[in-house]
Image: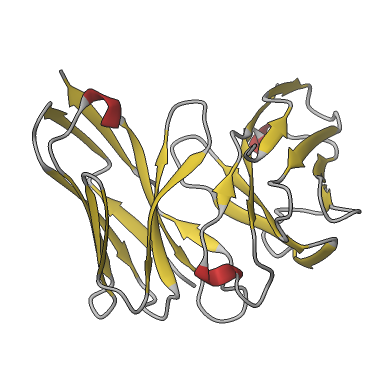
């Protein structure tokens, strides 16, 4: 079956532009995560969804970052008024179980969207 | 807050050599520890997941061990091949509320020379 897919794979934005990054999780996966990976660093947690509910957004770096998963499948991460420090790879991951079991299973990652803000 | 450290940051070995990658974590109250592989321009591929009740997991030429009391995990790669060249990341879930959050190390970049 298909894995996690993300689009676009690459995005160049001028500072101040708004961008939208899309994630298609594995079909039937309840949990969905967004991570941010700066160059030379490990991924850092941004936000977590169980179905359509955003249960944790503690990692979002500012109120310019917004994520949604309205129908419990596809998710979009939106960044408003992009800044140079937003340049990073944005990774989406999904897992089969919900909150009660997700900590005990692996997360399946997509290829990421590489965002460059000029 | 969980902190994860990986040593070394980079490693270059000749083909066929056995090698060990190290991972340490500060909070031992973890559900599990995972090892991932990341190839350039690609996402993360899960290699091994060790549950907190286990001491090691094996998959082919890979063996991962977990010592919660000392806050350490190692990934052993036997008979390395050029195709093993990648960045290897370990991740431990944040303990307590929000335990689904994975905290990653910065990774070890492995180069296997033919």
Q: Which quarter shows the C terminus of chain B?
A: top left
Determine the residue positioned at 73% across, 48% down.
A27
Percent position (x, y) of residue A108? 57, 49
Image x and y of residue A51, in percent? 80, 62
In the displayed structure, would residue B67 be above or below residue B41? below
Q: Residue furthest right?
A: A70
Q: Say which quarter of the image contains residue B82.
A: top left
When the figure is inspected, residue A116 is found, relative to residue A82, above or below; the finding is above
Residue A6 x, y percent position in the rendering: 70, 34
Q: Nearer the viewer, residue A35 or A52?
A: A52
- B44 on left or right of B83: right
Q: Residue at x 55, y 81 (%)?
A: B96
Where's residue B78, x and y in %? 14, 42
The residue under the point 49% across, 73% down is B1
- The answer to whether A108 appears left or right of A85 in the picture is left
Of residues B18 and B99, the one drawn nearer to the viewer in this rendering: B18
Taking the view exactly as shown, the residue that stands out farthest to the front is A1
Tally of marks: 0
Q: Residue furthest top?
A: B114
């Amino acid at each position: 079956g298909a894995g996690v897919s993300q689009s676009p794979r690459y995005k160049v934005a001028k500072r101040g532009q708004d961008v939208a990054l899309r994630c298609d999780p594995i079909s039937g996966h309840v949990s969905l995560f967004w991570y941010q990976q700066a160059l030379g660093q490990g991924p850092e947690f941004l936000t977590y969804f169980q179905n359509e509910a955003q249960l944790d957004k503690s990692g979002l770096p500012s109120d310019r970052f917004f994520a949604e998963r309205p129908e419990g499948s596809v998710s979009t991460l939106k960044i408003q008024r992009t800044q140079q420090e937003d340049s990073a790879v944005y990774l989406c991951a999904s897992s089969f179980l919900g909150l009660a079991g997700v900590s005990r299973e692996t997360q399946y990652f997509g290829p990421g969207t590489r965002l460059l803000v000029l | 807050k969980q902190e994860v450290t990986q040593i070394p940051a980079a490693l270059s070995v000749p083909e066929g050599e056995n090698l060990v990658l190290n991972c340490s974590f500060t909070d031992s109250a973890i559900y599990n520890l995972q090892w991932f592989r990341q190839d350039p321009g690609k996402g993360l591929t899960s290699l091994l997941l060790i549950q907190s009740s286990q001491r090691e997991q094996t998959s082919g030429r890979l063996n991962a061990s977990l010592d919660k009391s000392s806050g350490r995990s190692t990934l052993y790669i036997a008979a390395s091949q050029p195709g093993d060249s990648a960045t290897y990341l370990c991740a431990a879930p944040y303990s307590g509320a929000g335990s689904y959050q994975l905290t990653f190390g910065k990774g070890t970049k492995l180069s296997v020379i033919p």
